[in-house]
Amino acid sequence: MRTRRLPAAVLALVAAVSLVACGGQREPEAGGTGTDGGRLTIATGNTTGVYYQLGGALASVISDKVEGYRATASETGASVQNIQGLTAGNYDIAFSLGDTASDAVKGQNSFQQPQDVVALTRLYPNYTQVAVRASAGVTKFADLKGKRISTGSPNSGTEVIARRLLTAAGLDPARDVTTQRLGLPESVDAMKSGSIDALVWSGGVPTGGITDLTTSLGKDVKLIPITDLLPALNTKYGTIYAEGTIPAAAYKQPGDVKTIIVPNVLLVRKNMPDELAEKLTKVIFDNKDALVQVNAAAKDITLETAAQTDPVPLHPGAKKALDALK
């Protein structure tokens, strides 16, 4: 059988991702938000998640294609922490779930006041992935009562949606389940060891950590459908949540799994110069194929939906870039 060789440019990008997407959950000193060049930092997520992979790829593309700029991607706890770090000046660019970003601009839930963030673009949708050990006897989310469940990293978008799902299922997160606030790598390890019964993950499909879990445990783990909770979420939070499908082939499951999706957005501070925001937005779409090579979730980054970031405002420079690209 012949092995298809990737183009040299793609191989170079993949190699570069491992160099630029590095470090622990640290808050680096941000800079370079002027128009004359400098260093840009990107807040991503857990190391086995899609944010981290695409953040590293984006950092490589920016460093290579935007003259005068060097970008680096940092591992974080994801959405809430990313926005907090962005507004504090620790990061220049941040990945976030749309529901968390909506809370940020409205100053509610995890945010005590409106945050000065705007969007460069809408990204791909995040799929809520609920994995359970087959021995736990769980077929629907409400069956998690009395179980041990990982709700994601502290201050992550996964934690936000996990707690909302528990409430929508009529479960008290403090009393009806035993929660552990674990990052995805730690959640996967806990599932493998049997120290938890289930995990919630909000991410692109496929996510490396979930692939690892389903490959390692095989029939001892499964993904469960959760769309029965969608009406309750829509009633309380609006239409930012929608129905989606995790294809059976994504994780070699017996069949497709109906789930809840929420869009991702790429955020910056309001004071980013228009020219830089325009360049960054343009480089994403000019180099989309390179991002797809790193993770297939990037296929769903489209010009047709790029400006659909409501209620998060679109940066004027980003709007200029998107208008020119259409």
Image (cartoon, rainbow, N blue to C red):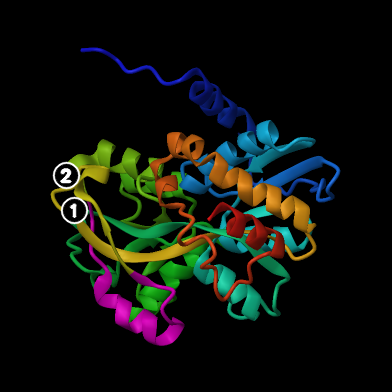
- The picture places residue 326, in percent across and down from the top left corner, at 53, 56
Q: Looking at the rendered structure, which numbered label has been put on residue 134?
A: 1
Which quadrant, please, contains the N terminus? top left
Q: Position of residue 103 (x, y in %)?
A: 58, 75
Q: Quadrant of residue 135?
A: bottom left
Q: Residue 72, labelled with which disc? A: none
Residue flagged by tag 2: what amino acid is it?
Lys
Q: Residues within 10 Å of mark 2 (few under 14, many from 20)?
A: few
Q: Residue at x 52, y 57 (%)?
A: 153
- Quarter of image, res 286: top right
Asked which quadrant contains residue 242, the reply is bottom left
* Marks 2 & 1, CB-CB < 8 Å contact: yes
Specify which label sits upstream in the sequence, 2 or 1.
Answer: 1
Q: Which residues are magenta?
A: 222-242
In the rendered image, residue 52, in percent from the top left (x then y), is placed at: 54, 43
The residue sitting at 39% across, 42% down in the picture is 296
In front here: 158 or 304?
Answer: 304
The label number, if any, that marks residue 219 in the structure image: 2
* Residue 111 appears in view: yes
Residue at 76 percent of width and 58 percent of height: 274
Going by the numbered disc 1, the residue's amino acid type is Ala
> Where is residue 47 drawn, in percent x and y?
52, 41
